[in-house]
Image (cartoon, grey):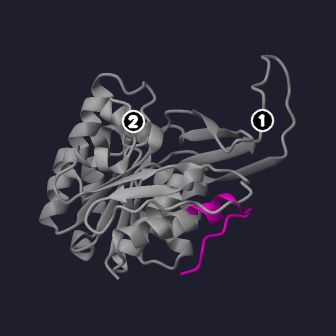
Amino acid sequence: MKPLAVVGNVNVDMILGPAEPWPVPGSEVVVQHDDLRVGGSAANSALTWRALGADYQFFANTGADLYGVWMREQLAPQSAAWPVTRGPSTVSVGITHPDGERTFFTTRGHLAALRWEEVRDGLDWSRLSGGWLLLCGSFLTTALSAEYGALFAHARAAGARVALDTGWPPEGWEGAARRDAQGWARAVDCLLVNEAEASALQGNGAADAEALASLLAPGAIAVVKRGVDGAEAHGPGGGSPCAAPAVEVVDSIGAGDVFNAAFLHALAAGGSVDEAVARGVRSASRAISTHPRRYDVL
């Protein structure tokens, strides 16, 4: 089993829903489901690896409040050395909808303060040699993503491959966000995005993995996650789309993060790209249809 690590966004998730139609201002809506949990793409991926019994490294930051204390407790032991940023922790309220989609309301909080120097000194790079480093929440961890060039170079020198899930830019994809993401994509070994992100990243409406791969370096893996329609990848040993099983959705928040973790776990275990896509789809489908969340056992 090759080593794994994840770096990026950890925040408080309050999940409520389903809600339809969108409420009239000043009204009150009673929903069927609520869940308060540690969230953020990096945390969701780490918790998936924990459930799958993986040995992994995990680095992030929290705010200096009770939410920060709670998140570090939930994510111990990896969180013991995380930096604590002055001010409140980031909180994200996710409203789910009957069709499986969701809407987020997120505070800036602590995420923008995570710095490359902290990540550099917080990971055991020799232990990561030959493995995968997953980066998440690029448009929220803005101080870190501004130093991605140094991070990518350091990872290459350490013999680690980089997988990237940019997330959705709060200001939209026009202008700097697309240029930045395209630059990151050319420097990573695996890009993991959903359909909407794939289309916006290319700026031409195309959302298939083969088209996305044209933005990457030769030999890199492009993955497009398609929700209820499964996922597909383009790269060495990949190319066959994988359909998702029919499940009753409890909430879909974090489904793509669960996919990322299970996909990379399968690659680290020696699986092919197509096998890793199938593993990711299966794990994500199980996670979104169970409460409390469960993941397929390997």
Which residue was labeled with disc 1?
19
Examine the image and state in which quarter residue 159 appears: bottom left
Nearest the eye: 44 or 203: 203
Where is residue 276 shown, x and y percent of the image? 42, 69
Q: Is residue 208 left or right of residue 251?
A: left
Question: Does residue 196 lie above or below 7 as drawn?
Answer: above
Which residue was labeled with disc 2?
199
Q: Amino acid at mark 1?
A: Ala
Where is residue 24 shown, x and y percent of the image? 80, 18
Where is residue 35 shown, x and y percent of the image? 73, 51
Give the residue at x 30% y 44%: 211
Where is residue 80 shown, x and y percent of the image? 45, 65
Nearest the eye: 249 or 16: 249
Marks 1 and 2, Cα distance to the nearest angstrom? 27 Å
Which disc, if any, is residue 249? none
From the image, which quarter does the N terminus lie in? Answer: bottom left
Residue 111 is at least partly visible in this image:
yes
Give the residue at x 34% y 22%: 174
Q: Secondary structure at mark 1?
A: loop
Q: Main secondary structure of the magenta part?
A: loop
Q: Secondary structure at mark 2?
A: helix
Q: Is residue 104 left or right of residue 132?
A: right
Q: In this figure, what is the number of numbered marks? A: 2
Q: Is residue 240 magenta?
A: no
Magenta residues span 284-298
Question: Does residue 70 lie above or below 179 as drawn?
Answer: below
Nearest the eye: 158 or 256: 256
Examine the image and state in which quarter residue 119 appears: bottom left
Neighbourhood count class around disc 1 (C-alpha, 10 Å): few under 14, some 14–19, many 20 upward:
some
Q: Amino acid at mark 2?
A: Ser
Q: Residue furthest top?
A: 25
